[in-house]
Amino acid sequence: MEAVSIRSVDVPALGLGTWPMRGDACTQAVTTALELGYRHVDTAQMYDNEDAVGRAIADSSVDRDDVFVTTKLLRENLRRDDALESFRRSLDRLEMEYVDLLLIHAPNPSVPIEETIRVMNRLQDEGSVRQIGVSNFSIEQVQEAMTASETPILTNQVLYHPYRDRSAMLEFCRDNELVLTAYSPLGEGSIATDETLAEIGATYDKTAAQVALRWLLQQETVSAIPKASSQEHLRENIDIFDFELTDAEMDHIFAL
C-alpha cells in the first residue's frame, strides 16, 4: 500500500470510509477490506459504527499497530469536558487503547477551536491519540488550529473528487505539510458513470471510479477514503496501484 508521508508520519494513501454503514454490515465490510490489504479505516462518533469497526479490527489477523484508525469528535462534543468524555467512550466502543488520528469533525461556531485543540493535545500527551487533525475546515480555520496546537496538525479531511475544485486548499496543504484527505472521492456514485473517466480508464482496463481514485492519489499529499461495502467494490477501489495517469490525462480530469 502506498502512503502519504508527512513529517515522518505515513498515512496509507487509500483508506476505507465507513459512513453510513452500521452493525454487522459495517463489521463485514471492514473485515473484507483488511483481508484485501486495506490498512486505513475511517470512522466517527457521528457514524454510530465505532463498535462495528473496532470489532472487525479486533477479530482480524492483521495486527492493530498495522492499521491506521481515524475517528472524529462530533461537533456537539467540542467543549473541553465533552471532548474528553466522548473520546473515552469512543475508545471503549472501538476497544482500543489509542487511535492513530483524532479529528474535529466540523467546526462549531460556539466553541473556540483552541479549546478543543488543547484537549486533543492532552490526549496526545497521554498516548491515547497519536496524531490530530480537522475536517471540513476552511483555510482560515486550519490556520487557527495550527496556531493553537502544540503539535503539528496532520490533515484536513474534506469533500474532494473530480467535480470539486480544491486547488486553494491543496496549495495550502502542500505549503504547510498537511495531508488533504478526500472523503466521498467518488461523488457518492456519480463519478462511476463519467464518460471522460471511462474513456481514460479503457486505456488501462480500469473503471471510471478507479481512474478518479488514481487521479486523487497522484496528487501530492492527497489520500482518499472511499466508502464501499461489497467485496467487488472494495477490490476495485484498491486495485489502482498498477497504473499511472499521464500529465495530459491528469489535466483532462482537472478540467472537469
Image (tube, grey):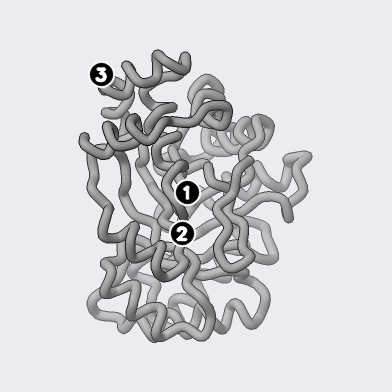
Q: Earlier in the sequence, mark 2 or mark 1?
A: 2
Q: Residue 236: x percent and y percent? A: 51, 24
Image point 27% across, 32% down: which residue?
252
Q: CA distance from mark 2 to mark 1?
A: 7 Å
- Disc 1: which residue: 223
Image point 53% across, 57% down: which residue?
70
Residues under numbered marks 1 and 3 in contact, where contact means CB atoms less than 8 Å apart: no
Residues under numbered marks 2 and 1 in contact, where contact means CB atoms less than 8 Å apart: yes
Q: Judging from the image, what secondary structure is the residue with disc 1 in?
A: strand
Q: Which mark is on residue 243?
A: none
Q: CA distance from mark 2 to mark 3?
A: 29 Å
- Vertical arrangement, residue 65 with respect to residue 23, above or below: below
Q: Residue 90: x percent and y percent? A: 55, 63
Q: Residues within 10 Å of mark 1 (few under 14, many from 20)?
A: many
Q: Amino acid at mark 1?
A: Ser
Q: Amino acid at mark 3?
A: Glu
Q: Residues within 10 Å of mark 3 (few under 14, many from 20)?
A: few
Q: Which mark is on residue 195?
A: 3
Q: Judging from the image, what secondary structure is the residue with disc 3 in?
A: helix
Q: Amino acid at mark 2?
A: Val
Kindly tell me whether residue 148 is visible in this rendering.
yes
Q: Judging from the image, what secondary structure is the residue with disc 2 in?
A: strand
Which quadrant: the C terminus?
top left
Out of 26 and 137, give the one closest to the viewer: 137
- Disc 2: which residue: 179
Which quadrant: the N terminus?
top right
Image point 46% across, 83% down: which residue?
149
Quarter occupied by residue 199: top left
